Image: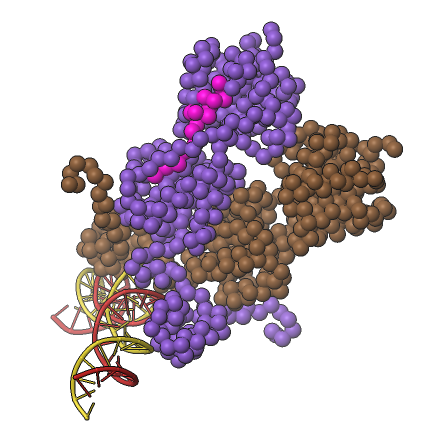
Chain colours: A purple, B brown, C yellow, D red
Amino acid sequence: MSRNGDPVATPYRPRPTLHDVAAMAGVSIKTASRVVNGENGVTPAKVAAVRRAVLQLDYRPNVSASALRRASGRTAAIGMVLEDLANPFSSALLRAVEDAANSRQVLILAGSVDEDQERERSLVRAFSERRVDGLIIAPVGEDQGYLRAELEAGTPLVFVDRLPQGLPADCVLSDNEGGARAAVHHLADTGHRRIAYLGDLQIVPTAQQRFAGYQRASLERGLPWNPAHHVHDLHTIDEAATATTRLLRSDEPPTALFASQNLVTIGAITALQQLGLEDTVALVGFDDFPMADLLKPRVSVIAQDPFQMGRVAAELLFQRLDGDRDAPRRMVLPTTTILRGSGEIPPASP
Amino acid sequence: MSRNGDPVATPYRPRPTLHDVAAMAGVSIKTASRVVNGENGVTPAKVAAVRRAVLQLDYRPNVSASALRRASGRTAAIGMVLEDLANPFSSALLRAVEDAANSRQVLILAGSVDEDQERERSLVRAFSERRVDGLIIAPVGEDQGYLRAELEAGTPLVFVDRLPQGLPADCVLSDNEGGARAAVHHLADTGHRRIAYLGDLQIVPTAQQRFAGYQRASLERGLPWNPAHHVHDLHTIDEAATATTRLLRSDEPPTALFASQNLVTIGAITALQQLGLEDTVALVGFDDFPMADLLKPRVSVIAQDPFQMGRVAAELLFQRLDGDRDAPRRMVLPTTTILRGSGEIPPASP
DNA sequence: CGCCGTCACGACAAGGTTGTCAAAGCCGTG
DNA sequence: CACGGCTTTGACAACCTTGTCGTGACGGCG
């Protein structure tokens, strides 16, 4: 009863192949291939015939089969292993790389690892099984030695945001230590001596570097070293808010806060607002975030430039793909200090 | 003189193939294939030998070659065509789809179109040449008929955020009209009668729907219809801010604003803050955004749920991949009205 | 007119894999 | 020991494409 409009599964029409194109154009497969790939040595008449057939059949070359046969084996795709595709930092990286890849007709496979080492490895494996031409990785694991085979097979690797461990490879980092140091110096310049550190998971290398910057600046300025003012392992807004509240309610509260990361900064702001202290306690956050200049007070930050990081990483990768086989490079991108208000609140006179 | 540490380009080691595995294990290629694919009918001793060889060579099956040969032709990859990978809406969609894909060992190819029709088509073409198993598309073009060949070849298509034109395909939308209508009703409930509409590019279908909702609610509440209070084609924060400023400085300024989109909302807030009117003029925005509840006043919004949208789209897609060939479905996701303060500001008494 | 170089073209193999199928080995039974 | 039935195994073709190379046609030259 297929007449009365029942949805009937029409059989799928198989995709046309070069074989079909060649048949329709009345030439050999090889000649069709030549035309499709723009090689010369084909009569204009046959070129036209093949072109017609391609159009009529809506022929799409099969890149997989092509890559399989081609000498270079290039698939014109690269893989990106990121922390979380939904977070602004990762997605800015992705977008920047996309722009670079786009101009070379290269596609991007992307995945999130969520701080899970196992997932990092399985993603890389999946990309490798697709024979991506290169990988850009924001590593979470403690050892990237498992990638040696990729490197040896000639797949260029570029690490972003964090240093690779146990593998010589290109790498693009922010100046985490320098940025954190600048933040603390700025708060000290404003008159603060009791500056709390609110940090991400200590296993995260960038968090370590930022704490090192905090420590270095504290030393340089002769600030009191008070472990009660150092909170580590904050990984969500709520955790950061809770920790901030506790700090500010303690006997000897800090007069300024350095938040080592996006979500921590937001958590700190939440807590400050709840306590009504947002105009009393100074705050500098690491990482800029949207809206930072619409809050009251506007939030001073140490900004990274994820777009530039992605752009530089992509440049490195494509240089490698173009044959550059020099020693691995490490690029350190400077941070920018953006003063908007929250970091310029002076300490309350005691 | 390669002894003294000059960087010397060591030749790349070609990736091991099944052939190599088979040779090392002393079996035929086919038997190695059987072991790798977990087929049975292989002696335990040979299974063990092949496993050893796989491990020792760090063999990675070539998914492309495999897909080429397999009857299904599945590549275990899907393509996503999004507005801009760096914007929160797109990246939330991407992430939600990734989570669904991940549980099926499917990878994601993603690209941004930036409101460029041409780019939409070229991205789809690139994905199609990779023989992705399915496509999730946030369309920008005015006609998706060019995708018919994909559909006929059996590649499931799911559209998100916007309806496809000229093609019967699955589709997941927010209730744009309903959400906008709710926003205006809420502002009317608060006592407003002069509610301005600040809208995105008019060619964008979602913008049209939101304007329709605004119009419908205005009618339902008998609000004055004042074209001077309707601003269209705002696509950046700056444009929105400028337009808002102009509106509020006009002879008969609105007492409330409905911003039809993320960036427009932010632009409106910027303008309100500059004019010192943020506690005087009411504002409801379409789309939630991070920090909306840390601003002063907190920003009332009509929230979409991009994660759910992505999840639903992925579900549809995978159902199709699992053989569902029913008529195309259209899913409309409800919006949520989140009242935080800015939408509850009463009109200034004249 | 015969020879040779050039060019267009296609037959064939190969790339890494899986589906098909026949051969070979093993077992128990009569 | 011959036979039938079962399991294990590998040779071969095929997927779609491109690289190699030989063939045949053509034009130019001696």
Q: Is residue A94 visible?
A: no
**Viewer-proximal residue, A280 or B58?**
A280
Q: Is residue A177 left or right of residue D28?
A: right
Residue in view at x 49 percent, y 54 percent: B79
Q: Quadrant of the C terminus of chain B?
A: top right
Q: Is residue A341 left or right of residue D21?
A: right
On screen, residue A47 above or below B72: below
Image coordinates for residue B274, horizontal then vertical, percent: 70, 31
Residue B295, by quadrant, is: top right
On screen, residue A177 above or below D4: above
Tell whether position A171 is magenta: yes
Q: Quadrant of the N terminus of chain B?
A: top left
Residue in view at x 56 percent, y 9 percent: A251
Q: Is residue B117 visible?
A: yes
The secondary structure that most of the magenta stretch takes on is helix
Q: Is residue A63 left or right of residue A347?
A: left
**Viewer-proximal residue, B170 or B123?**
B123
On screen, residue A120 above or below B204: above
On screen, residue A164 above or below B148: above
**Viewer-proximal residue, A254 or B94?**
A254
* Residue furthest to the top: A350
Image coordinates for residue B25, horizontal then vertical, percent: 20, 53
Tell whether position B248 is magenta: no
**Viewer-proximal residue, A330 or A246?**
A330
Image coordinates for residue A337, horizontal then vertical, percent: 51, 27
- Magenta residues (range): A170-185
Q: How many marks?
A: 0
Image coordinates for residue B105, horizontal then vertical, percent: 43, 49
Residue in view at x 52 percent, y 24 percent: A259
